[in-house]
């Protein structure tokens, strides 16, 4: 084998090891769906917290003071 071939093969092997590990498209899509579900759930919880706060009567309305 020629030294040039060895250098090329060594360079290709090292380049393959140096590339960052990539998340597959399927895993990335699953992670995005999970994030969207979690975000949607948090929005719903905040909505119902606000709705429940608005349904409760204000403390001043519970015991009206008549002069």
Image: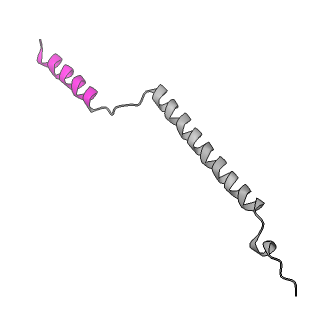
- 14 or 22, which is in the foreground? 22
Residue depicted at x 65% and y 53%: 46
Structure colour scheme: one colour
Q: Position of residue 34 (x, y in %)?
A: 53, 36
Q: Quarter of the image holding residue 65?
A: bottom right
Which image quadrant: the C terminus? bottom right
Q: Is residue 39 left or right of residue 15?
A: right
Q: In this view, which residue lies farthest toward the top?
A: 1
Q: Count of labels shown?
A: 0
Q: Position of residue 33 (x, y in %)?
A: 55, 34
Residue depicted at x 60% and y 48%: 42
Q: In this view, which residue lies farthest toward the bottom?
A: 67
Residue depicted at x 70% and y 57%: 50
Q: In this view, which residue lies farthest toward the right?
A: 67
Q: Is residue 3 above or below residue 48?
A: above
Q: Position of residue 30 (x, y in %)?
A: 51, 31
Q: Is residue 19 left or right of residue 47?
A: left
Which image quadrant: the N terminus? top left
Q: Quarter of the image holding residue 24?
A: top left
Q: Is residue 37 above or below residue 13?
A: below
- 53 or 15, which is in the foreground? 53
Residue depicted at x 61% and y 44%: 41
Q: Position of residue 10 (x, y in %)?
A: 18, 23
Q: Magenta stretch?
A: 1-17
- 4 or 46, which is in the foreground? 46
Q: Quarter of the image holding residue 18?
A: top left
Q: Is residue 20 above or below residue 1?
A: below
Q: Main secondary structure of the magenta part?
A: helix
């Amino acid at each position: 084998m020629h030294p040039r071939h060895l250098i090329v093969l060594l360079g290709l092997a090292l380049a393959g090891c140096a590339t960052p590990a990539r998340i597959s498209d399927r895993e990335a899509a699953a992670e995005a769906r999970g994030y969207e579900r979690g975000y949607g759930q948090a929005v719903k919880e905040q909505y119902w917290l606000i709705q429940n706060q608005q349904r409760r009567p204000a403390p001043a309305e519970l015991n009206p003071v008549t002069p």
